Amino acid sequence: MKTPIVDCHCHIYPEKVAAKAVQGIGAFYDVPMCEDGTKATLCRETKEAGITHSMIFSVATKPAQVGSINSFIADEVQSSEKTMTGLGTLHPDSEHLEDDVKQILALDLRGVKLHPDVQGFKIDDYRCLKIYELCEKYQLPVLLHTGDKRYDMSNPNRLRPICEIFEGLTVIAAHLGGYSVWDEAVLQLRGFKNLYFDCSSTMAFLPPEKTASIIRQYGAEQVVFGTDYPMWSPKGEVERFYALNLTPEENELILWKNAQRLFRLEQVS
Ligand SMILES: [Zn+2]
């Protein structure tokens, strides 16, 4: 049996808006986007890359989009023949957050993806506290975009107090805890037992030894693999991951075991 690989970080968009959405993200980060953001391309490319399971999601920039995006993700999961699992979206300005969370649970989405810089809130904004409270109550892990040295919305210093207050909340801090502020992230975020990290949109920017050292400072049992599709090609990210030269035990934990436990995945291979 080949090693399962779970890609914990994939954005997908409906066909008719994908081109525009992908162009928007590329412009926001000033990074050339590798892929087109559709599920069809994701399916094809993950197969080629040896990825066996993908976590898919999309982010609502307005509260009114929450319900339809969550239904869209659930439909895409349904038609994926058990190769995909979804995360839901929430928006802090929604007037019925608890109902939104109940929709996520009813659709069997296994957590929530939040993107502070794109959705327009700071991680420790009082408007978000209700989200963390509900996700803690219903045991939904929160995958949180973290880090951007150009802004002050999602940096690790804003996540730290949330981890201190919501001790029962599981958070996955994307991009090893702080895109473009990796050293600061390690200083602020090491040592929380319910805080995990994904390695997406990191390996393209740092030398492999540096990425490996950050992973080991957090501990491989707290790191999961992710590609940040459509920003990078799945195949390229898998190659970058193996180039980190971690031990076989660390690879297993990061490539699938941690993700399987975190998102309660029945099937990963
Ligand atoms: Zn993301």
Image (tube, rainbow, N blue to C red):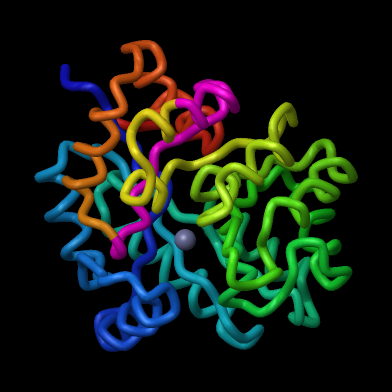
* Residue displayed at 32% across by 78% down: 22
Picture coordinates of residue 209 (x, y %)?
37, 28
* Residue displayed at 58% across by 52% down: 181
Q: Is residue 56 visible?
A: yes
Which sits in the foreground, 131 or 123? 123
Q: Quadrant of the N terminus?
A: top left
Picture coordinates of residue 56 (x, y %)?
40, 57
> Disc count in the image?
0
Within the magenta stretch, is there residue 233? Answer: no
Using the rendered view, name the quadrant where residue 132 is placed. bottom right
Question: From which residue to which does the magenta span run?
Answer: 213-231
* Residue displayed at 69% across by 62% down: 101
Picture coordinates of residue 50 (x, y %)?
16, 37
Which sits in the foreground, 7 or 40? 7
Which sits in the foreground, 42 or 99? 42
Judge whether 1 appears above or below 84 on screen: above
Q: Quadrant of the C terminus?
A: top left
Would residue 220 appear left or right of 241 to someone viewing this image? right
Q: Is residue 106 visible?
A: no
Picture coordinates of residue 225 (x, y %)?
39, 38
Would residue 170 appear left or right of 38 to someone viewing this image? right
* Residue displayed at 62% across by 55% down: 105
